[in-house]
Image (spheres, rainbow, N blue to C red):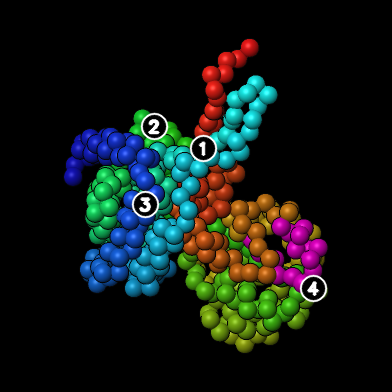
Amino acid sequence: MNANATPELMNTLGQQAKAASALMAKAPAAVKLRALRGLAALLRTHVEPLQVENAKDLARARAAGLAEPMVDRLKLTPKVIETCAEGCEQLAAMADLIGEVSGMKQMPSGIRVGQMRVPIGVFGMIYESRPNVTIEAASLSIKSGNACILRGGSEAIDSNRALAALVQQALVEAGLPADAVQLVPTTDRAAVGQLIAMPQYVDVIIPRGGKSLIERISAEAKVPVIKHLDGNCHTYVDDPCDIAQAVAVADNAKTHKYSPCNATESLLVARGVAADFLPRIGAVYAAKGVEMRCCPEAKALLASVPGAKLVDATEQDWFEEYLAPVISIKVVAGVDEAIAHINHYSSHHTDAILTTDHGHAQRFLREVDSASVMVNASTRFADGFEYGLGAEIGISTDKFHARGPVGVEGLTSLKYVVLGEGDVRV
């Protein structure tokens, strides 16, 4: 497709999405449920064809020299496909929020005033790598009664096309418009610039990818953006804590999977437990080949760990999102210093405290300024599926409209509804 055709293509997609959004907004809950269950069934019966298309993307990525953590994000394994199907079913089983009226109050004037939950309309989704995002975005769009325009990364184009075809099949079979979920069919980068500058068609943009992508979208968009820039997540090991439990959680938070934005990138350890805790977690990380970038105190306590990859931490390491088998480690005086460090260096995504002190836990929950704050749990739980949202469109570190994993509710808005009986204002 030549560049001159891209503006016309995007204009057409916008018009079709706007028209479809009106039909989606009034679609009965049972019809949306049918589409979601149908999509789950189609995913399960198309595992092999999906993997054939996915293999094309994987081969192209490896030939282009894409780093292995990035290749890992591209994979559509049977487990990933099953998780997508389960997410569709989880959404289908949830109550439909659209049309729900809350807070209805009788006013002294005689009118009754409340708020009704309604779809946003049309959202544009721009994402990199992970093709499963196509299903997460589509299923949430269906459940929330929106239409969406999806622009995946060029590295996953074959996988995304195959997934989008199944989505449209499920929509049509349920009696909903195929244009309710549209995938931008071109890899032309100009399509992104066009998508984020169509306020006449698109109500909100949701970028999901690397920091440079999101910074560009945020700077150039002419419609509102729901975003997060990166995931520099912290785990703080408190004094007092259950050392064995802390080792298990800190291990999972870092090594369960290195590439997601909810993996722990920085480990803070209270001085009172550091001598006991650090050699134990250091042995775990060393066995798994995790490089540890340490403050001088942490490095000294880890020096005796066989095979440990120890590096002196720089100031930049405290800000870093590695997405790799690398972690920064710092010994802190206690909960006060931990909270101050996190609020200064964190990307305000997800941060956890491992503690047996209730007061410290409550302080951490109140004072850490992040979208998800956890007590005695792995940061890897910061996920729409794990939070019971069915799926997530992304994790927002914004403070307005949506914060944390963005599910169905984050893709809706509220409008005031007023009920009267011929009331006039005096």
Image quarter where the C terminus lies is: top right
Q: Are marks 1 and 3 in contact (CB under 8 Å)?
A: no
Helix or strand or loop: what does disc 3 sit on?
A: helix
For the magenta stretch, what is the residue range?
A: 351-365
Q: Residue at x 58, y 55 (%)?
A: 349
Q: Position of residue 274 (x, y in %)?
A: 75, 76
The residue under label 3 is 30
- Residue at the farthest top position: 426
| Viewer-nearest of discs 3 and 2 | 3
For badge 1, the amino acid type reads: Met
Residue at x-position 65% and y-position 27%: 107
Q: What amino acid is found at the position of numbered circle 3 in the picture?
A: Ala
Q: Which residue is mark 1?
A: 116
CA distance separating discs 1 and 4: 47 Å
Q: Residue furthest bottom?
A: 306
Residue 324, x across and y down, in percent? 50, 69
What's under tag 2, amino acid-wise?
A: Pro
